[in-house]
Image (spheres, coloured by chain):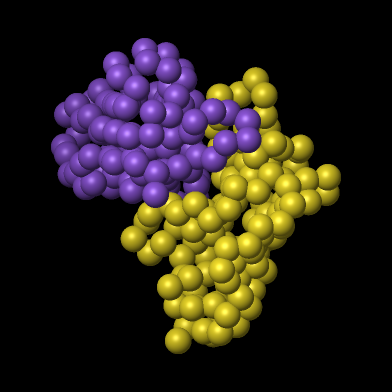
Chain colours: A purple, B yellow
Amino acid sequence: DAGITQSPRHKVTETGTPVTLRCHQTENHRYMYWYRQDPGHGLRLIHYSYGVKDTDKGEVSDGYSVSRSKTEDFLLTLESATSSQTSVYFCAIREGLAYTEAFFGQGTRLTVV
Amino acid sequence: GIQVEQSPPDLILQEGANSTLRCNFSDSVNNLQWFHQNPWGQLINLFYIPSGTKQNGRLSATTVATERYSLLYISSSQTTDSGVYFCAVDAPYGGSQGNLIFGKGTKLSVKP
């Protein structure tokens, strides 16, 4: 199994508070991604990184920021959590682009009350 | 953008039965993956199969890239096969690098 660890696995937080989710990989893969999974919407890309300090927005980036100061860690921050950000968040990694597999972490279930 | 459609949306099987899941995509792709999301929510890689046929135990997959579809075969199904099966393809060039576009999935329930 690919070495990807997400933390925390579950979190309940209050509206308006900042929240940071962590994705840690031991594969030394260049590309890292944050997705959210919601009923009726499937998995949608929030942000991704193509190297240390290199990040870009995905389809649903509003209200989220990311940082990648080391190859192995990709952090997702909800600047001021809202109920609409209640979701399951997945991190993914890829070694390269074309002709490479993506591997996913176990997911983080976030509830904003 | 590229469209990924999976069928059927739901499937109920008796243990021991065989099944075929289908994934159609609207544009040429250079990556296609099949995942199993188990009842605990974990996304498990099944196949990386941009073209051709692969087999892994009771599961096999075939992608016909020129006709823009992929099939996942499950033989002698077991209750542990239950969950949602997703296919996903790379977003086209010009989009987010390496982003996967997912189908809506096929929810499989295998009854004992």
Left or right: A107 as drawn, with respect to B56: left
Q: How far across and down, in percent of the image, does residue A51 sit?
A: 42, 17
State which quarter of the image contains the C terminus of chain A.
top left
Q: How far across and down, in percent of the image, does residue B45 sit?
A: 49, 52
Residue reaching furthest right? Answer: B66
Whether residue A43 is visible, yes or no, is yes
Q: Front-most of B94 and B1? A: B94
Q: Is residue A27 above or below residue B18?
A: above
Q: Front-most of B93 and A78? A: B93
Q: Residue at x 23, y 40 (%)?
A: A7
Q: Front-most of B15 and B1? A: B15
Q: How far across and down, in percent of the image, does residue B88 sit?
A: 59, 45
Q: How many marks?
A: 0
Whether residue A81 is visible, yes or no, is no
Residue reaching furthest top? Answer: A53
Q: Residue at x 64, y 45 (%)?
A: B32
Q: Quadrant of residue A48?
A: top left
Q: Residue at x 54, y 59 (%)?
A: B85
Left or right: B2 as drawn, with respect to A14: right
Q: Residue at x 28, y 40 (%)?
A: A6
Q: How far across and down, in percent of the image, does residue A92 sit?
A: 42, 37
Q: Quadrant of residue A76?
A: top left
